[in-house]
Image (cartoon, rainbow, N blue to C red):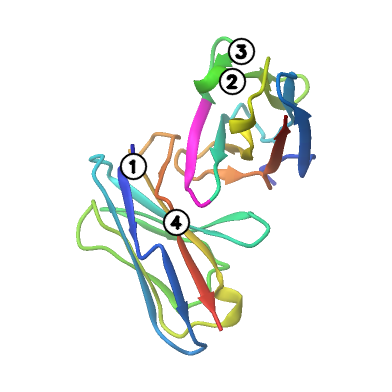
């Protein structure tokens, strides 16, 4: 049963455009995450965020930014996409202090 | 550096055969360890987790894993696989709760 919802599931765009992915969780969790999964299925954490702290993976380019209105939502904005941004972006949530994450189905980005 | 390694990129087994997917970890202490599964075009789903106690942990769909401190391993096992088990399996670990590090994944192909 899906409790972490991502939109859109697919997005095709051109280099230089701005893209946003939305994520909402209905589990009552207080921490949310964005992961990037490349074409080889490798997973890399981009951001983790709760009401108190944003942790940014230092390797994430500045054109990526998380946006949160409340603890149930964490969106991902890419200001000016580049070809290497083509990937699946996975949103997840958890309770702070818990190890188990709950994932959405992913948002696949293709940059032409 | 803290890491999780899955040495086998692909594993192919026949339906009904037993299965072991390997995972090695490198942490200074005892980490929290997880196995996740990703079916095509879906997010990751938790199979099982180890925090402490009995080194053999049971998961969903007949999967189990055994924690070994001496071998720094957390291998996943199943006594008899089904074709629907075909998916990508990820081992993950953390000592800082919520900051999961994923292995590179093992693609399991079950053939009839």
| Outermost residue to the left | A70
Q: Residue tagged by mark 2?
A: B63
Front one among A44 and B27: A44
* Chain for disc number 2: B
Mark number displayed over residue A106: 4
Mark number displayed over residue B35: none
Q: Within 10 Å of the Cα at label 2, are there few (<14), some (14-19), or many (20+) other Cα atoms? A: some
Query: Residue B31: x percent and y percent?
Result: 58, 30
Instruction: Classify mark 4: helix, strand or loop.
Output: loop
Please check whether the numbered discs 4 and 3 fall on a single chain: no
Instruction: Classify mark 2: helix, strand or loop.
Output: loop
Please check whether the numbered discs 4 and 2 fall on a single chain: no
Front one among B57 and B19: B19
Dot 4 or dot 1, earlier in sequence: 1
Instruction: Classify mark 3: helix, strand or loop.
Output: strand
Residue located 49% across and 87% down the image: A14
> Which quadrant is home to the N terminus of chain A?
top left
Is B44 part of what is drawn in magenta? yes
Where does the magenta region start and end?
Answer: B41-48
Q: Which image quarter: residue A73?
A: bottom left
| Outermost residue to the bottom | A16
Residue B30 seen from this side = yes
Query: Residue B109: x percent and y percent?
Result: 71, 38
* Chain for disc number 4: A
| Chief SS of the magenta region | strand
Front one among B50 and A87: A87
> Which quadrant is home to the C terminus of chain A?
bottom right
Q: Residue tagged by mark 3?
A: B56
The span from disc 2 to disc 3 (Cα, nearest Å) is 11 Å
Q: Within 10 Å of the Cα at label 1, are there few (<14), some (14-19), or many (20+) other Cα atoms? A: few
């Amino acid at each position: 049963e899906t409790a972490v919802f991502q939109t859109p599931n697919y997005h095709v765009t051109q280099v230089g455009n701005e893209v946003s992915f939305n994520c909402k969780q209905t589990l009552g969790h207080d921490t949310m995450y964005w992961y990037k999964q490349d074409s080889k299925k490798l997973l890399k954490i981009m951001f983790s965020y709760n009401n108190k702290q944003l942790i940014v993976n230092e390797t994430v380019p500045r054109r990526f930014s998380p946006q949160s209105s409340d603890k149930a939502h964490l969106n991902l904005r890419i200001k000016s996409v580049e070809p290497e941004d083509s990937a699946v972006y996975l949103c997840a949530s958890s309770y702070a202090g818990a190890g188990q994450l709950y994932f959405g189905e992913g948002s696949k980005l293709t940059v032409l | 550096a803290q890491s999780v390694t899955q040495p086998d990129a692909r594993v192919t087994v026949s339906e009904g055969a037993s299965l072991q997917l390997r995972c090695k970890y490198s942490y200074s202490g005892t980490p929290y360890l997880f196995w996740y599964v990703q079916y095509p075009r879906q997010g990751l789903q938790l199979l099982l987790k180890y925090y402490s106690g009995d080194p053999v942990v049971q998961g969903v769909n007949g999967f189990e894993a055994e924690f070994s401190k001496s071998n720094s391993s957390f291998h996943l096992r199943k006594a008899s696989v089904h074709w629907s088990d075909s998916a990508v399996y990820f081992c993950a670990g953390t000592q800082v709760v919520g900051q999961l590090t994923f292995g590179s994944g093992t693609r399991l192909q079950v053939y009839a």
